[in-house]
Amino acid sequence: MKLATWNVNSLNVRLPRLVDWLGATRPDVVCLQETKIVDAKFPRMELAAAGYASYFVGQNTYNGVALLVRDGLGPAADIALALPEFGDEQKRVIAATVAGIRIVDLYVPNGQTVDSDKYRYKLDWCRAATAFIAGELGRHPSLAVAGDFNIAPEDRDVHDPDLWRGQVLCTDAERQVFRDWLGLGMRDSFRMFPQPEKTFSWWDYRQLAFPKNHGLRIDHILLAPALATRCTACRIDRNARKGEKPSDHAPVIVDLTD
DNA sequence: ATGGCTGCTTTGAGCAGA
């Protein structure tokens, strides 16, 4: 089982690249964020032609998440489309059970700046997500939580920690959320393996950030113990950030033994 | 040397992303 997460920053713009990437990478399940598309316009036919079933919840302009499931894995079951007991207009969560694995796809709010209402919303949202993950883990030992967390967990996940210190994505409160999720028993799959230094998953479109590798690692796949023992690799597909009209995020991919 | 983004919006300057 190959599981991936990718913030595509508009499925409208990125669909050709996504289809190419699916063909080249052949993941079994893909968690998408920032689809920015209403359900009625979701390109399910195009993705079906590429060999994937789509499950999604979206809206115009912002947010939107989807799960893509490769044909032959069987249908996704027990689909959830929001954090329970957290009134939220924004479409940031989809969860489903696929081939015995419970997959939670999160698009964590950005937070904008620490003095903004959006930062408060981010922390409230994350607290609700903590409760959701705890509940899911209780029901499903084979749990994966993947997505754009908008949290760089440690200084080594930041190209210039001094520049980013205390800034949104890197604050103590956000990093504590990440540790809270690990504290539930989840493992950061990326850190289960030796990794090259300065490996990131997001680079600003501006100021040549990508060629200078001025990035952050903010996209993650967390695995419950029962899946962590099956995990043989985690990598970030930096090549997907190259070329014409890339997303500003690169995909994260894990391999799980059967 | 400097500044160099992208996607979206009941189309066109402004917001948001991170």
Image (tube, coloured by chain):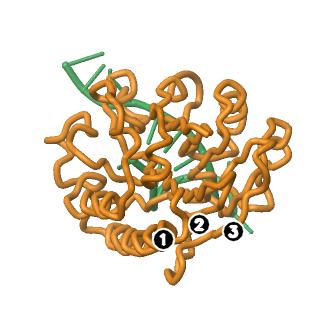
Chain colours: A orange, B green
Whole-percent x and y of residue A85? 51, 84
Q: Circle 1 is placed at which residue position?
A: A138
Residue at 67% across, 63% down: A57
Q: Is residue A222 left or right of residue A243?
A: left
Mark 3 and mark 1 residues within 8 Å of each other at the beta carbon: no
Quick check: do tags 3 and 1 share a chain?
Answer: yes
Residue A109 is tagged as: none
- The amino acid type of the residue labelled 1 equals Gly
Judge whether A236 appears above or below A182 on screen. Answer: above
Residue at 39% across, 27% down: A210
- The amino acid type of the residue labelled 2 equals Lys
Q: Is residue A192 left or right of residue A257?
A: left
Whole-percent x and y of residue A182? 33, 57
Whole-percent x and y of residue A31? 59, 49
Residue A62 seen in render: no
Residue A91 is tagged as: 2
Residue A78 is tagged as: 3
Residue at 17% across, 49% down: A165
Q: Earlier in the sequence, mark 2 or mark 3?
A: 3
Q: Chain of mark 2?
A: A
Q: Earlier in the sequence, mark 1 or mark 2?
A: 2
Relative to the observer, which residue lies in front, A165 or A155?
A: A155
